[in-house]
Amino acid sequence: MTEHESAIYFGAELMLHHARVHPMIAGHLADIASGALRAAVDREYLLAEAAAAHAYVESRQAFGRVLFLP
């Protein structure tokens, strides 16, 4: 990360700024449910391929969600 880039730890944001973050997430979920916002799905894995899915996520190559399918 360069000196001009920044990042946040979402878990901490959820805990420290609950009153701001939780309504924002609820709004995003409502937008996804209505079709106004689409979540990017990168890859889908069967549950039997869970180890491969975790390896892919840990490789930091994922862009979007990685889904487990039954």
Image (cartoon, rainbow, N blue to C red):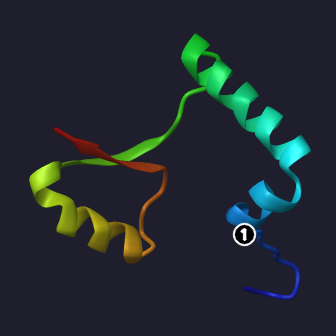
**Secondary structure at numbered mark 1:** loop
Residue lying at 48% horizontally and 56% vertically, measured from the top left:
63
Residue 46: image x %, image y %?
A: 15, 47
Q: Which residue is mark 1?
A: 9
Position of 51 with respect to 56 (left or right) is left
Position of 12 with respect to 46 (left or right) is right
Q: Compared to 39, does 65 lie above or below?
A: below
Find the residue positioned furthest to the top. 34
Residue lying at 72% horizontally and 69% vertically, measured from the top left:
9
Residue 53: image x %, image y %?
A: 26, 62
Looking at numbered disc 1 in the image, what kind of residue is underneath it? Tyr
Position of 54 with respect to 32 (left or right) is left
The crowding category of the residue bearing disc 1, from other C-alpha atoms within 10 Å (few below 14, some 14 to 19, many at least 20), is few
Q: Quadrant of residue 12?
A: bottom right
Rendered-image quadrant of the C terminus: top left
Q: Compared to 18, does 30 lie above or below?
A: above
Q: In front here: 29 or 37? A: 29
Residue lying at 82% horizontally and 75% vertically, measured from the top left:
6
Q: Compared to 1, does 22 lie above or below?
A: above
Q: Quadrant of residue 48?
A: bottom left
Q: Quadrant of residue 50?
A: bottom left
Residue 41: image x %, image y %?
A: 41, 42
Count of labels in the image: 1
Q: In front here: 53 or 42? A: 53
Residue lying at 86% horizontally and 88% vertically, measured from the top left:
3
Residue 4: image x %, image y %?
A: 88, 80
Rendered-image quadrant of the N terminus: bottom right
Find the residue positioned furthest to the left. 48
